[in-house]
Amino acid sequence: MVIAMSVTLIVFSGVLYTRGITGRETSRSYLSTNPASATILFERGIDADKMAAIAAAARKQSGIINAAPRTQFTLQTKQEGGREAWGPNPLQIFVAAPDDPMQIETFTVEQGSWPPAAGEILLERSSLKLLNVAVGDTVIVKAPNGEPTPLRISGVVYYPALVPSFQEQKGYGFITTASLPVLGEPVVLDELKIQVADQPGLTIPGRDRDVVVAATRDLAGWIQQTYGVAIREIQVPPLYTHPHQRQANILLLALLIFGLAGMFLSAILVATMLNGLFAQQIPQIGMMKAIGARSSRILQLYLLMTLGIALIATTLAFVPGILFSRVFTTAILSGVLGMDAASLAAPWWMYVVAITSGIGVPLLFALVPLVKTSRTTVREALNDRGVDLRTFTVNRLDNWLAKLRGLNRMLLLAFRNIFRKRARFLLSVGLLASAGIVFIVGMSIMSNLQTSLEQGNESRKWDIEIKFDNTNQVSTDKVKSLMMQIPHVSNVEPWTIIQTSIAQPGQLSITRTYPDQAHSSMNLDVFPEDRSLIPPHLFEGRWLRPGETGAVVLGQKVAVEVLPGVRSGNTVQLSIGGRPTSWKVMGISEYSGVSVWVTDEGFKAAIGANWPNVLRIETDSHSEDTRLAVANAAERVLNDVGIVVRSAESSSRSEAIQAGHFLPIIFIFLGLSISMGVVGFVGLASTMSTNVLERTREFGVMYAIGARASTVRRIVVAEGIFIAVISIVVAIIPALFLTAMISDGFSKLILYQYLAPQISIQAVIIWVVVVVLGAVLATLAPASQASRLTVREALAYL
């Protein structure tokens, strides 16, 4: 009993602590970077001195706490002495002035110092492994002018506001404006980071997004009028939340669900085991009553016994629960968020909850059987034979079993025996079924996430994606013709993918884009008519018809975050190149990105022309070497006609990005499912052992009338298998329902991506094997021990 209760408490307290630590450390780590409330993007770069003057003037405006000028860009990379081909992982570079105090969006320098010298760069620590470099090495970047340029890695920083490099498959670097001439760029900046207070005079960044939007919009209008500069858009991301907060929310929700499930299993386990224990000791209770013990004294005695067991179990589970939480917390913080924990101690009240639950749950669930048992009369106690004579009579089940022919009578007897104590039968089946439900649902969600990952990879029919600046306005036909001349190219799709926002007449566009300019940025995808795109699953509405104009399909995240409440049939206003356009929503897709889809004809009708800026190329062999060769050849061809290539990436990078986002979640679900499976197995072993022990006298009677020890063992093992099989049948329908419910919730509320509500057949098979094998092992050992007793010892057993 102590071991079984300890295991359930370890799992419950472990996931409870993990949830508390992760939630606290995520907020603390992100806020330690002092994130900006908003970013004002200028139409073009402004001289660094002028930007410094604008920032100084902005700090004096009402409600503005601080302001800092910055810029950023993304370049292709390769190692010094590497191959001629550019590497698959780009480097996103953040730029600040050398005298910037770095009070906004700051980081911790772990090696080296800030500011780096001209021609030097500090790398975010997770980027070192991705780019396969170290401090002191030189990384070669493809400068904006197309020239290979070396940058020396002078140090390492820790910046928890960014997503880990392995998830985005790109590195992060930090330089000063002193390095811009080294890259062939003028010393200009085009971003103004600001922090906004909820009320004028306050020095703490505000939490009211409406206030931030209004203050930033007023500041941007003032800057335009005062300095005569054009502003492209205003970016106000979800305030003070990490870009991967949604992933963290998934895991925190999973921890909460599994924690409650663990406590539920613990309650059933306690009730089952105490029920068996009290039934086993009914003769002793009768003897105590016969010599004068009162019901209240017996109740006190067994409550103290239960308290003692609970105290021992809670004590044994305390340290393992903490260790369990530290493993899970580290996996979530480092694997999903790229963060360090300042403290791995859970909030104090969670320790109180765990200890109270460990002691209180057994006492609470012991009360009902204890009160009932303590009120048993002396005659009833001494006459107890392990069955209720009022219910264990010939009934329809017995009549039906008696009519069966050709079946082993031993199996029929074992099947009938499992109903001898209905309450215990229901508790045993309930425990195993509950553990099975939790295990199957957890494994199914993990399997569905993995299936979604595989389907996403299969939906990408292209091998290479090339992004370029089509400032020369080269036509779709010409670009496609140039690419088809390259060896091993079997198909080319010219796409147009541009950033867009919700148009607000007479006002600057407000987006939810994060400072990395990637997360929550809203894209308009213009796809060609002869596309290989497989339309994503739609939550509502329909997909676009060929040649349809004035119509869009929205990604689920757009419908939830950007345009909450929008439905199919509504009209939305989109800003394209600063021009407001009107579109009718045809459907809402399961796609997890912040994207809007339109047809090529629809885009041309709204804008007047369509110059592609993305090429998706399919090769004839789909090998990585062929992809690399084609990407390099395509880049040379485009450069020859005056098209500047921004990036040329293999589809394997997209697959790695998606895997980086999904795999940590999958592994966490796997770990939690296994933990719940262990709880179920321990519960199974405990309840079956208790059931066997309380029937020791019954076995003595069976031996007295000629039963062999092997026969008794087979009957008892068969009973355990029957209970296990029934629990599996009982678990299937609830598991189907919960899997569908959780999948739908994850799809619509957290993932923004369709998650098929399918039961994992592999999980069912694993659980069937575990529970049946567990039933055999759990009953065979105590049954074998009982079978070695003599008739006298068995009949004298109390």
Image: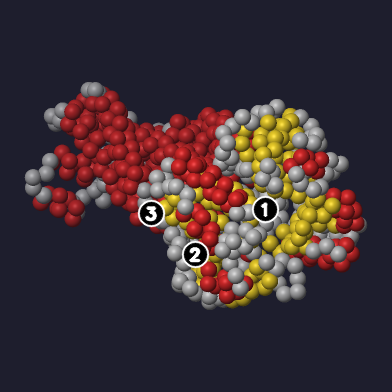
Identify the secondary structure beneath mark 2. Answer: loop
Residue at (79, 36) in percent of width and height: 118
Q: Position of residue 64 (x, y in %)?
A: 85, 57
Q: Which mark is nearer the camera, 1 or 3?
A: 1
Amino acid type, callout 1: Gln
The circle drawn on residue 758 is 3
Residue at (11, 49) in percent of width and height: 404
Q: Is residue 40 above or below residue 314?
A: below
Q: Position of residue 18 (x, y in %)?
A: 58, 40
Amino acid type, callout 2: Pro
Q: CA distance from mark 3 to mark 2?
A: 34 Å
Between 552 and 64, the one nearer to me in the picture: 552
Q: Quadrant of residue 418?
A: top left
Q: Quadrant of residue 131?
A: top right
Horizontal arrangement in the rendering, residue 612 relative to residue 676 (left or right): right
Mark 1 or mark 3: whose residue is earlier in sequence: 1
Between 219 and 297, the one nearer to me in the picture: 219
Can residue 688 be seen here?
no
Circle 1 residue: 517
Circle 2 residue: 528
